[in-house]
Image: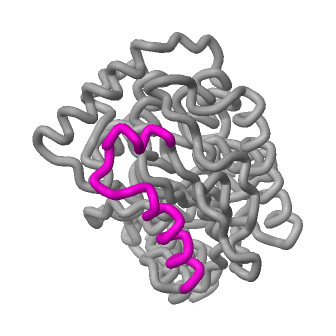
Amino acid sequence: MRSRLQQKIDNKTKPLGALGRLETIALEVGVIQNTLSPSIQKPTILVFAADHGLAEENISPYPKDVTWQMAMNFVAGGAAISVFCRHNGIALKVIDAGVDYDFPPDCPIIPAKIARGSRNMRREPAMSLGQCEEAMTRGRGFVRREAENGCNTIGFGEMGIGNTSASSLLMHRFTGLPIETCTGAGTGMQGEQLEYKKRVLKEISEKYDPATPLETLATFGGLEIAMMTGAFLEARSRGMVILIDGFISTVSLLTACQFDPSTARNALFCHLSDEQGHAVLLEHFQARPVLQLGMRVGEGTGAAVALPVIQSAVAFLNEMASFEEAGVSNK
């Protein structure tokens, strides 16, 4: 299929390689869907929100209440992800994976609360194994329903004060890279604050010795990260195109790959985040991002902004004339 797609691309009415990165994106989508005529159908972004007990340790400049406040902003249409999804024709669904707040019954946030946030991993593992497994199962269920409704292209975002710290720990444990390499500013830690964050994360990493991917995710992760991990696994099993956002989404993909290494085959890496560690992760996956805009807001925004470029790649593959069709000489 890869060679047949490349032949189709090369026979379009253009010089070889003249559409640059669009050509490789078209190739990647065609390979994922195993077809010469790929399509983007009912693109959807699921945003998982949850609180983190580790936020008690002042590893973020923002208070924990920002998690529920931003989740409400998502569904009210005022957040970056809301704007980009609205303008790019992407369905946006916000899921309460474990926010320490009771959303109003008439609120469009989808209830799936496992607990009112993870526990403070400086004192105890973030989740029990049962909570972690349940979160993964629910994440799978959300993707299954989207696939059954005709979605074949899906992205994942997140919201949770403290989740860059959880992601840095997971990256550190799954790659073996130093915690300093894996830890960045998050929502804005700088100078001594950032050094404090690194010290806390190093202390936490040295406290535990989980033996399996599930134990590692339960120890260092978060409810939204666990739910996203299950969502990745289900999307892979259904042959969907997976739109990878920034640092936290890529760490969730890394985590999913500990359960099924083939999951990355369905991934399109949408952008290079400015969050420290993301460039290293992209190198780990030998991935070239669609965009590089200096973003590090999370929420799935990189996936939402990149989708029109991906749709353009699919459109030229399906609609642009070949030399033979156009009666143009190709020597």
| Residue for point 59% across, 80% down | 75
In the picture as drawn, the residue positioned furthest to the right comes out as 148
| Residue for point 63% across, 32% down | 127
Towards the viewer: 124 or 37: 124
Q: Is residue 32 left or right of residue 147?
A: left
Q: Kindly indicate the quadrant of the structure image that contains residue 187.
A: bottom left
**Is residue 30 visible to us here?**
no
Q: Is residue 103 left or right of residue 25?
A: right
Towards the viewer: 313 or 227: 227
Residue 11 picture location, percent across and down: 55, 69
Q: Is residue 326 magenta?
A: no
Q: Is residue 63 magenta?
A: yes
How many numbered discs?
0
Residue 274 picture location, percent across and down: 27, 54
Q: Is residue 35 left or right of residue 71?
A: right
Towards the viewer: 74 or 126: 126
Q: Which residues are magenta?
A: 53-76
Residue 78 picture location, percent across and down: 46, 84
In the picture as drawn, the residue positioned furthest to the left comes out as 191
Quadrant location, the C terminus? bottom left
Is 59 located above or below residue 49 in the figure?
A: above
Kindly report the secondary structure that dominates the magenta region of the rendered protein.
helix
**Is residue 39 visible to us here?**
yes
| Residue for point 33% across, 59% down | 296
Residue 4 picture location, percent across and down: 66, 55
**Way the structure is coloured:** one colour
Q: Kindly indicate the quadrant of the structure image that contains residue 183.
A: top left
| Residue for point 83% across, 57% down | 144
Is 81 located above or below residue 325 in the figure?
A: above
Is 40 located above or below residue 76 in the figure?
A: above
